[in-house]
Every structure is written in structure tokens, then in C-alpha cells.
Amino acid sequence: MKMFTSILAATDFSIDGNNAVRRAARLAHEHRARLKLVHVLDPAGCKPLRDWFSPSTDIDLKAALARDALRRFAVEIAGRYDVTANIEVMVGPLLETLMEASEPAELLVLGRRGHARLNALLVGRSADRMLRTCRCPVLVVKTMVRESYRRVLVPVDFTASSDFAIPMGAGLARDSGLHVFHAIDTHQNALLRATDVPDHVIREYRLRQEAGTIQRMRLKATQLGLDSSRMDFAVAHGHPAWATLSHAQELGADLIVAGRQGRSPLGEYLLGSVSRRILAESGCDMLIVPRPRKKPLAHVSSPQMRLSAATAHADAATVA
């Protein structure tokens, strides 16, 4: 399934940044997508090499070294993944420059940790700003690239964004199947216990609640034109972030797909506290997906077209 036609990978040449490049290359190979590698030089971080050198000389030298490093990556990628990568060294404020570069892309790939400037994009207010501003999905790579994603976990909360979570995850899971998960709020159970409802009644209620939730997820997958028989559905009781993290660890997930949700009709979106917690605490890669750029899912008529629209302009997941 071809989900992306254009992928942008940014690296600061740290270990995680370079892993992001290799993951982007593997995805470009799998989805027959164009690949571009970028390195951003921030003029504020460039100082003269010597007192008699100008700042522009320092930037020119660093740009030349970065360009050479990107060329070596392009050669490696061509040999390992059979992908031809374009390269570019960009000069400007890191966040704004990266957002501008990602505008024509359908996927932005970054490393989780790295040098301080790139790492700042994924922590605190800078992360909120980047993930609110970026119009394409952002894949945060935390692990070495050994194979395609094999265990993709999509936590859903039955909001509108969840309609794009499952198709996006299915496209990335490829032939390995997909794991769809929902964390059930324990507030109702707590109320039942507080009113001295017998334990056996609470247990029966929980079982019915779990079965109904799984049926609801299965029905949603069918409505999206997907084969639910190839998916695994699971539920747990507890806080969405901790329940998702626990299930991801138990599953051995190598990718979690989550989406950001709208906070106002004017289009200002924030990365929710649940997604932020999962991004910070999970040990696997994570994909954050915004609203689709073009037509919403409801405008797609057939199941095949519906899946194509959902994956190409995904809003993925869930938790916010």
C-alpha cells in the first residue's frame, strides 16, 4: 500500500538523527516515495572559527561539511534501500526553517534525541508549537532501523481523528497486522463501588463494557473498508496514557500512531497531554498525525477510495 509520495528527513548527524534518516529511507523504499534529506544551520549558533573569520565564513564552512555528510548518506541509502535521495542544507531558525521545508512533504521524520537544538523541538513548548504548526504527519524515531514496522499499535478514543488512525496504522503495519487499543475510563466502576454495588455485578458490567468496546472498534474498521479479521483488538481499564504505555510494552510495539485533536474552530491544535506523555515515556517510535489537508474522510465514497484518502491525508489516532 502506497501511503506517502514525499518524505522529508531532518538530521543533526546525531545517532538518533541518523536513525531517522535510515527509517525515512526504508519507508521511501516501501512506499515508492520521493526522499529528501535536510540539515538546518541556525546562524545564531554559528560563531567565527577565528577572530579574523566572519560569521558567514563559518556558516559556509559548516554548510559544506554538512553537505558532504548528506551526500555520504545519499550514497548509503542508494545502495541499501535502492532510493535516490535529494539533499539540502538550509540556513535559518531551526523551527521555522524546518516547518517551511516540510510544507510540500507528506511525512516529516525526526530523531527523538540529538543535539540540543533539535532535541528542543520535541520537548515542552517547542514540541507543542512544532506539532501544532506542522501540517504533515511527524514520525519521531527512537530506535535503530532493523526491519519494517512489525507491531503497530493504534490507541483509539472514538473521536473524529480516530477515523484516520486505523487506516494509517494499517498502511504502516503492512503485512504484519494491526493492533487497535482503547483504554476504558474507570470512573464509572469507581462510582459503582462507592455505592456498594456487589462485586459480581461490577464484574459483569466490566465484561459487557469490554465486549461492547471491542465490537465498536471492529465495526469502525469495517466502516473504513478494512479487513478487521487481520487486526487485533484489545481494551484495558485505566488512564489512557499509562494503559497505552503498558499495552505497548506488553505487545512489544515498535510504532505507536497517535493524532492531535482540534481545540478550537479556528484551527489551533495542541498535542494533548496523553499523547505528550506517550511520546515522552514510550520506548518505540511514534507517529503524530494532524488533520487531513484536503477532503475529509466523509467525502470519500467507496471503501478503496476511503482508505486511500485516510492514509494519504491521515489524521491518525487517538489519544489527545
Image (cartoon, rainbow, N blue to C red):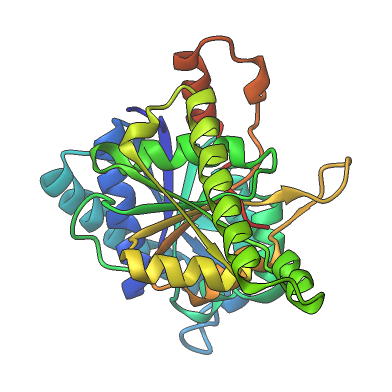
Residue 254 location (% of width, % of height)? 33, 61
Residue sitting nearer the eye, 80 or 263: 263
Q: Name the residue at 25% across, 47% down.
A: 26
* Left or right placement of residue 288 versus residue 32 in this view: right
Is residue 86 in view? no
Check the picture and name the quadrant holding the N terminus: top left
Image quadrant in which you'd find residue 216: top right
Image quadrant in which you'd find residue 231: top left
Is residue 42 shown above or below 295?
Answer: below
Residue sitting nearer the eye, 285 or 221: 221
* Left or right placement of residue 205 versus residue 224 in this view: right
Q: Name the residue at 44% across, 15% down.
A: 304
Is residue 193 shown above or below 183?
Answer: below
* Left or right placement of residue 249 versus residue 220 in this view: left
Q: Name the residue at 61% across, 52% down.
A: 209
Q: Count numbered badges in the picture.
A: 0
Image quadrant in which you'd find residue 255: bottom left
Q: Name the residue at 31% across, 36% down.
A: 230
Name the residue furthest top. 301
Name the residue furthest bottom. 51
* Left or right placement of residue 158 versus residue 11 in this view: right
Is residue 257 shown above or below 172?
Answer: below
Residue 169 location (% of width, % of height)? 43, 43
Residue sitting nearer the eye, 70 or 271: 271
Is residue 154 in view? yes
Check the picture and name the quadrant holding the C terminus: bottom right
Residue 250 location (% of width, % of height)? 35, 69
